[in-house]
Every structure is written in C-alpha cells, then in structure tokens.
Amino acid sequence: MRSNNIKSKLFLAKYSLVKNNSKQYFNELLKNQKLEKDELEQLNWIRTQKLLTYAYEHVPFYRNKFVSIDLHPQDITQPIHFQQIPVVQRNDLHEHFSDFIS
C-alpha cells in the first residue's frame, strides 16, 4: 500500500510540471474511483452532455452535422439517443479537416 502512495505522489509531481491544476484533477480522480456504479454513470453522462454541447457550439463540423439531421445536443437526453448521431468517417476527416478545429 505504501508503494502505491509513493507512486501516486511521484505521478502527481511529474504531472504537475505539465498541467496546471493537476492536484485538483488528481484529487477528483481519487474521489471518483470510490463512486458507486450509478453515481459514476451519472457523472459520465453529465460530462458527455457537456462534450456534445461544446462540440455543437465550437466545432463547425459537428454543428453542421447536427443541423443537417435537425438535432440539437439538448435532444440527446439518454445514452440510447447516441444512435441518432452520425459516425464520423475517414473521408469526413479528409474532406472537412479544418472544420474539426474548435
């Protein structure tokens, strides 16, 4: 157990050199690993909704895709609704590369 604690502290020290607020993120990771399954699923769903909203608002490709199928991130209220989002194909990346930049 002690070696895991030392490894964790070493990881945090190295990560702190690269990423601001790393201690905050690390503590959040430690806290989240103790969540119950339903709490973790809820947290994942909230983060997924934020990601969808961000992509819609800041990434032209995704905004255009959503508009073309008359879908808004707020319409995706359950994980099953992901089936409505078109899968990005390799040719989409080649043809619309600049539209993927947020």
Image: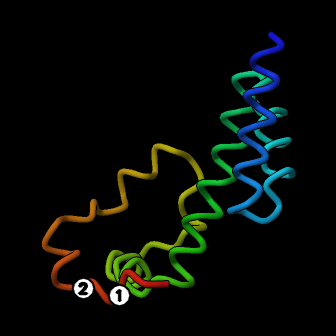
Nearest to the observer: residue 74 or residue 61:
61
Q: Which kind of residue does numbered mark 2 sit on?
A: His
Q: In the displayed orientation, state which residue is furthest to the top.
A: 1
Which residue lies at the image location 78% right of the left edge and 47% below the top edge?
A: 13
Q: Which kind of residue does numbered mark 1 sit on?
A: Asp
Looking at the rendered structure, which numbered label has been put on residue 99? 1
Seen in the image, is 61 located left or right of residue 59?
left
Looking at the rendered structure, which numbered label has been put on residue 96? 2
**Quarter containing the N terminus:** top right
Where residue 7 sits, quadrant-wise, is top right
Relative vertical location of residue 101 with respect to residue 76 in this rendering, above or below: below
Residue 42 at x, y percent in the picture: 71, 39
Where residue 77 sits, quadrant-wise, is bottom right
Relative vertical location of residue 92 with respect to residue 44 in this rendering, above or below: below
Which residue lies at the image location 66% right of the left edge and 54% below the top edge?
A: 47
Instruction: Using the numbered discs, state the Cα–Cα distance from disc 1 to disc 2 in whole angstroms.
Output: 5 Å
Looking at the rendered structure, which numbered label has been put on residue 89? none
Relative vertical location of residue 6 with respect to residue 62 in this rendering, above or below: above
Label 1 neighbour load within 10 Å: few <14, some 14-19, many 20+? some
Which residue lies at the image location 37% right of the left edge and 81% below the top edge?
A: 100
- Total numbered labels placed on residues in the image: 2
Where residue 49 sits, quadrant-wise, is bottom right
Q: In the displayed orientation, state which residue is furthest to the left.
A: 91
Label 2 neighbour load within 10 Å: few <14, some 14-19, many 20+? few
